[in-house]
Image (spheres, rainbow, N blue to C red):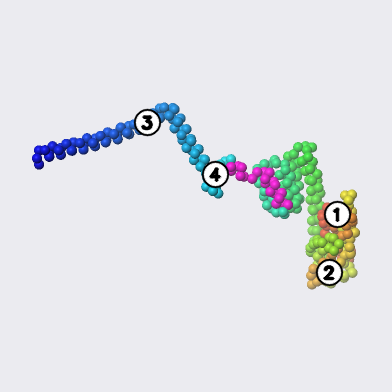
Amino acid sequence: MSGGKRRTWIWAAVMLVVIQLGGLWGLLEMRRGEGERGRELALDPEAAVAEAKGEKEFREALRNLPTPEGTVRLSVATAQASAPQVEDLLEQAKNLQNRGQLDLAEKLLEQARRQDPKHQRVRIASALLAEARGDSKVALERWRNLIQGSEAGGAVRNLALALSKILQERVRLEQVERQREETLAKQPRKLALVGVEESRGEGGKRVDWSVRAIGGVGALDVRKVGVRVQFFERGTDGILKKSEAGVVRWAKGVPLQEADGLRVVSCEPKVGVGGAYVGYTWQLFYDGELQDERIQPSSLRGVLREKPRS
């Protein structure tokens, strides 16, 4: 290799080393500058505030982004607003009760009571619903609880007192009716009431009572079978009174033995002008002895004078 070429190669190697050293120096200066900037942010309060403000704006921008169609961004406020409130539950329960869905109405009122145990309208609705379900004991208990939790002399307490007295009498009459039925069931009978159906007759209401003969008592005498029916109405003056009744009719005759199966005896009330039908008392006799009876509603028991045999 000649001397000129050797010098050229040496200079090229030196320049390459210089360039590499320069690159390394620049990289070190860049990293040191970033570290100093970080220290400046940490030591400069204004820089820290600006950094926090920027981060807050970034988060708000994310929160304000439009949600996908069909979705709702959930928060505590929206969750509370979407939950059914007491008044909504009360209104829904009333609608369900009007449609005859009493079990669902009871569940909604129970949910409303959990949300606000002292809500008087909910408690009144619960007592009325228990009455509609025919549960007199539960209704009476709810009225009594309402009496204890309401203002003395107030409209709510007066209402609860009046209705609780009516219910108390109804419960007593139901107990008396059960006792009478148990008494009749224990005594030997020849005829028994099986079922009752109320329907619309030619001139108005019609009531059908299904009767059967008790097995093992032998053939019965049709002349000894008697039915006594009394219908009741409430006149325009509000007074309860007896209604006129049509003729008692047996379909296919009186059941005289068990093999005759069910036989229906019917009668129709003749309610006076302006009067409103209330109910009936029905009794079945054989040879002068009471065999069975039905009183609808049970509150009419007080006007029934005949008593079952002792």
Q: Say which element carries label 3.
A: helix
User: Is residue 70 highlighted in magenta?
Assistant: no
Which badge, 1 or 4, comes first in the chain's sequence?
Answer: 4
Residue range highlighted in magenta: 78-98
Q: Position of residue 41 (x, y in %)?
A: 40, 30
Name the mark nearer the viewer: 1 or 4.
4
Q: CA distance from mark 2 to mark 1?
A: 28 Å
What residue is drawn where x is 55% and y is 43%?
A: 74
Q: Which residue is mark 3?
A: 37
Q: Nearer the viewer, mark 2 or mark 4?
A: 4
Q: From what the image shows, is residue 143 above or below residue 285?
A: above
- Which image quarter: residue 151? top right
In the image, 93 versus 214, the foreground residue is: 93
Amino acid type at image mark 3: Arg
Q: Which residue is mark 4?
A: 73
Query: Mark 2 vs mark 3: which is more N-terminal?
Result: 3
Q: Secondary structure at mark 1?
A: strand
User: Mark 2, mark 3: which one is toward the viewer?
Assistant: 3
First of labels 2, 4 by sequence position: 4
Q: Which residue is mark 1?
A: 276
| Distance (Cα) linking label 1 and label 4 | 59 Å
Distance from the alpha carbon under mark 2 to that under mark 3: 108 Å
The residue tagged with tag 2: helix, strand or loop? strand
Q: Residue furthest front?
A: 4
Point out residue 157 in the picture as x, y percentages from the top left corner.
77, 40
Is any part of residue 110 visible from this angle? no
Point 76% across, 47% down: residue = 140
